[in-house]
Image (cartoon, rainbow, N blue to C red):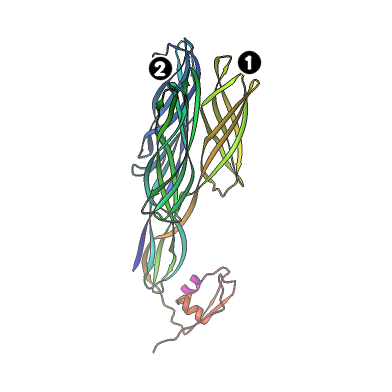
Amino acid sequence: MFRYEKIDAISTTFLTPIERVVEFTPRGADNIAKVLSLSVDGKALSHNCCDGYADISGRADFTLIYLDYDGNPSSANYNADFNVRLDGDMVASDKLSVGIKVIEWKVSSGDILTLSAVVKVYGMVTKAVPINMLADADNSYMTTSKVVIPTSVATTGYSFPVDEETTVGDVEKVLSLSTKCSLTHTKVRDKQLDMSIDTTATITYIEDGQMKTATFLVSSEESVAIDEIMVGDRAYVLPQVKSAKVVLAGVTGENILRFEGEITTSIYVTRYEEKEIVEDVFMLTHSTTIERENTTLTAFVGTGFFKERIYGETDLPDCDNGSLIGVPASTAFVAKAVKDEDMNVEGIATVEIIYSVDGDIRSARAEVPYSVSLIGDFTDKVVTRVSVLDNSVKIKNQTAEINLLLGFEISSFAESEVKYISSIELGEEREVNTSGLSMYVANDGDTMWDVCKALTATPEQIMSQNPTLTFPLKQCDKVLYFRQLKG
């Protein structure tokens, strides 16, 4: 008599981020006379949903460029693993995505050299929410409404190679490689996801006795075959540099400096399905006991991509005749993102500058605060990621003039409320109105339901004899119903 439909909806919750200090004390660092640059990259190694919390393992990769006591540039790479726990409403079967951002780092020198970084760990949990709703009822009058429910279409991963090269002189030594990647565009087609990802790689090296840097910007256009998706679905993409290396080739005096890397992406596809649900039920023959549920679902709706230039400067003391060697690392993080009519994003971008003054190699770290307003159709819940797509530094007198191109990825999530009948029980038989002619005198705000119950008649029967009725009724409105009696 009563038929139900089960819908596997999804809902996303955001775990409260945690900041963690990660430190590393390298062994055999006795030959470090002067630190020129430190860059740090954070990444997740593994993550698991447990009952009530997320268990996350991460790594901070430190790259140190320095001068030894003979005045020669050199470098060293170190990594420090760490574990964090993010508490939240989750179970082991939920899907978890994780982001790790380095927001601060420094070198403490003294009797012992210590590298430290502050990492911020984010977590987003997607839960399955089964909804069992009334879909139909025999011998009943029903009112229906339409709701939009987010469901999971596909969860997959995709990796692809990136590479770029340039011709230089004789490379004596590669000091460091810094890589970042950022999503710049997505488009969902039938059975296919198109995405654009920019990868920035900066190589610091020694050429013919001189320290230099080379920066590559690799724009990749990738198409991923996903049989389940179709136009209208929403794809949430999380890219990450899985691995990167520098390859040297060529001949003496004309080396090829080549960057090779692998980008991996996690892809979550959401579909918003419109469903017609039973809003209310009325049976002429029996009373009913109805149980209703109200579920709020949060799910991904789309991503906006923006590029903005920011400018800053920093003092370089005693640098009247200084020359730029390069910027071995740059990064940016979001301090806060506030939605008003538009999205205002504030944060700090950091660049590591290495320069030379009369053959003396020096370095400076510059922090460039930014506040940009992005115009778009944003929801109240957003995930904001920012990356440095390009950097340009000019030394003028004793000042470094900084020009940065930032890429902003704003992913919006929206709430939808679903009210539905979760169960209905058949009650006692109704007393049938057998009068040949009945009149119902309304109270203010009465609905068709109130009239049907009083007259024991269907809406169709009532409207056929009272075609001018409009609902809700007003005080003392009258409804006449003539019943054709048998016998």
Element carrying mark 2: loop
**Residue at the spot x=59%, y=74% of the render?**
476
Q: Nearer the viewer, residue 422 or 474?
A: 422
Establish if 109 lies above or below 212: above
Q: Is residue 348 magenta?
A: no
Q: Nearer the viewer, mark 1 or mark 2?
A: 1
Give the residue number, with chain letter if any, for mark 1: 318
Establish if 333 lies above or below 297: above
**Residue at the spot x=47%, y=85% of the render?**
436
Specify which label sits upstream in the sequence, 1 or 2: 2
**Residue at the spot x=50%, y=20% of the render?**
211
Report the side of 391 relative to 68 (left or right).
right
Establish if 170 lies above or below 390: above
Asked if residue 105 shows in the view, the reply is no
Percent coordinates x, y for residue 415 in the rendering: 49, 51
Q: Nearer the viewer, residue 361 or 170?
A: 170
Percent coordinates x, y for residue 419 in the rendering: 45, 58
Q: Quadrant of the C terminus?
A: bottom left
Mark 1–mark 2 Cα distance, whole angstroms, equals 32 Å
What's the mark number on residue 26?
A: 2
Percent coordinates x, y for residue 429 in the rendering: 37, 72
Asked if residue 306 shows in the view, the reply is yes
Element carrying mark 1: loop
How dense is the environment of label 1, judged by Cα within 10 Å: few (below 14), some, or many (20 and up)?
A: few
Q: Which amino acid, by three-letter code, is at mark 1? A: Asp
Q: Which amino acid, by three-letter code, is at mark 2? A: Pro
Q: Is residue 449 magenta?
A: yes
Please give the range of residues in magenta: 442-453
